[in-house]
Amino acid sequence: MKKHFAIATLVTLTAAISMVPAWSADAVADTGQVTLQSASIPALRQSIASAAGIALQSVELKHTAHQLTVTIVNSKQNGATSVDREREAIAIASVTERGMTGKPEFAGIGSIHLDYISRIGKTVKTIQLFDFFRTPANAFVLHKS
């Protein structure tokens, strides 16, 4: 019994060790993708601010190889209805999609996450969150649950 356990442990460890290069390769590729994206982020932020009619400093963008997070801080939409925020969020996602179209650094982005928040000093209040997922046709569509 101990012999079988030792063999099973050895096989498991060997398999796990052989997968480490694959995991690290993905991390390296993802880091490279994020680095390439960084050059396009300022123009994307400006497009979003213009589309929403808000100050540039109210738009925050965080990006990974697979997700773009847009945070709208202290928007005039914070006091609006959820329908109005949704309408603006769809417009922002559309502008963001157009800004990423044709740029290989954004090919791996599968979702756009959009947050409306209120921030006063260190106090942050979430107003509303939206998720847009990439379809097979490369369009970002609002996820409704």
Image: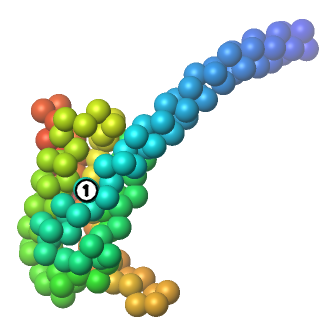
Residue positioned 27% across, 62% down in the render? 45
Residue 26 visible? The answer is yes
Q: What residue type is labelled 1?
A: Leu
Q: Is residue 44 above or below residue 138?
A: below
Residue positioned 45% across, 43% down in the render? 35
**Residue 17 in which image quadrant:** top right
Q: Is residue 34 above or below residue 15?
A: below
Residue 89 image point, x, y percent: 16, 65
The residue nearer to you, when weighing 115 against 99, is 99
The residue nearer to you, when weighing 84 against 29, is 29
Residue 65 visible? The answer is no
Residue positioned 40% across, 90% down in the render? 120
**Residue 124 in which image quadrant:** bottom left
Q: Name the residue under label 1.
A: 44
Q: In this view, does 145 lie above or below 6?
A: below
Q: In this view, does 78 lie to the left or right of 14?
A: left
Q: Which residue lies furthest to the right in this view?
A: 2
Q: In this view, does 52 lie to the left or right of 119?
A: left
Residue 114 image point, x, y percent: 28, 63
Residue positioned 48% across, 36% down in the render? 32
Q: In this view, does 120 lie to the left or right of 102?
A: right
Colour scheme of the rendered structure: rainbow
**Regarding mark 1 in the picture, which secondary structure is present there?**
helix
Residue 5 image point, x, y percent: 84, 15
How packed is label 1: few (under 14 Cα within 10 Å), some, or many (20 or more)?
some
Quarter of the image that includes the N terminus: top right
Q: Is residue 121 left or right of residue 14?
A: left
